[in-house]
Image (spheres, rainbow, N blue to C red):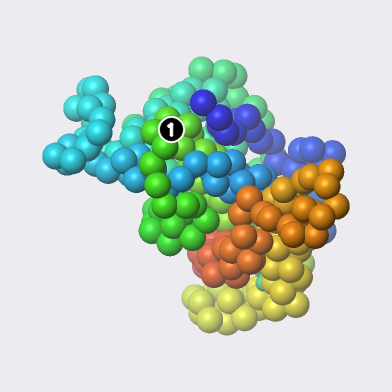
Amino acid sequence: MACASTDISPRFMENGNSDSKDALNLETIRKSLIRQEDTIVFSLIERAKFPLNSPVYEESSSSSSSFLIPGCFDGSLVQYIVKETEILHAKVGRYESPEEHPFFPDDLPRPLLPAYNYPQVLHPAASCININKTIWKFYFDELLPLFTKEGDDGNYGSTAACDLGCLQALSRRIHYGKFVAEVKFRDAPEDYGPAIRAQDRDALMKLLTFIDVEEMVKRRVEKKAMVFAQEVSLNDKEDNNRKYKIDPSIVSRLYGDWVMPLTKLVQVEYLLRRLD
Ligand SMILES: C=C(O[C@@H]1C=C(C(=O)O)C=C[C@H]1O)C(=O)O
């Protein structure tokens, strides 16, 4: 099977950055978001190797299902793979990381490994925010049909493993809004304080939105998709006729319609609880 994420329990701001509390600033956070764009684009490219493969998404209890999953599991193959992977990852501490959020949070096992001491940078209320249900829905209902071809090649296990990679990368990026919000609050508590005390969602949304940054993000992810997803050939003529493994404009749309709005939703949800 392909595509399972190897990044099991990321430690806040690793990959070249210090993990101390002092490293929490908008620049380091934005750097991490930029690096996560690469993971998201590559995960979509990996998923696009396979056609839609709709049997992966049929409930195993339905009469048309191609699978019989053991142990009274009546969900779809993709639900089964995500759920079982999360059980395994929970055992090795994935969900102890403040950057990670399970899609099936109920009854996850305790970690077997000794606890890693994550720096406490977020307000404790952060742990109640998990919008993975919304991410699951837009990914399967809206995004997937946009970037996969119709059809069925029988690679069901690999397809579901690739979906898992996409979901984990998107979930991590969107929930990073908690860190973005914390930094923005610390930089200007006098601006955010009154809107938080008034529980004014619209005012918070206005304060944390930077339209010019969002436009830049959309242009950058489209360009990344053009570079990462291009078919590379040694024949110059073919190069002039560029083909892409995924349509770069869909990546820009993914960010404009879902990733950034949902990151901002996480920011608002976090800020509403920031003074509890
Ligand atoms: C993440 C930020 O906050 C908002 C959300 C953005 C995003 O999700 O990329 C971009 C700009 C802001 O409107 C940020 O300011 O960097």
Q: Position of residue 83 (x, y in %)?
A: 38, 33
**Quadrant of picture, ligand 1:** bottom right
The residue most toward the left is 63
Image quadrant of residue 259? bottom right
Between 275 and 177, the one nearer to me in the picture:
177
Whether residue 191 is situated above or below residue 117 in the rendered picture? below
Q: Regarding mark 1 in the picture, which secondary structure is present there? A: loop
Between 222 and 202, the one nearer to me in the picture:
222
Other residues around mark 1 within 10 Å, as few (<14) / some (14–19) / many (≥20): few
Can the viewer see residue 269? yes
Q: Position of residue 110 (x, y in %)?
A: 45, 25
Q: Residue at x 31, y 41 (%)?
A: 55
Can the viewer see residue 181? no
Q: Position of residue 177 (x, y in %)?
A: 61, 58
Q: Residue at x 46, y 24 (%)?
A: 88
55 displayed left or right of 108 = left
Whether residue 15 is situated above or below residue 116 in the rendered picture? below
232 displayed left or right of 137 = right
Between 60 and 189, the one nearer to me in the picture:
60
Q: Residue at x 77, y 46 (%)?
A: 232
Q: Residue at x 59, y 19 (%)?
A: 114
122 displayed left or right of 90 = right
Q: Position of residue 247 (x, y in %)?
A: 62, 60
The residue labelled by disc 1 is 155
* Amino acid at dot 1: Asn
Image quadrant of residue 184? bottom right
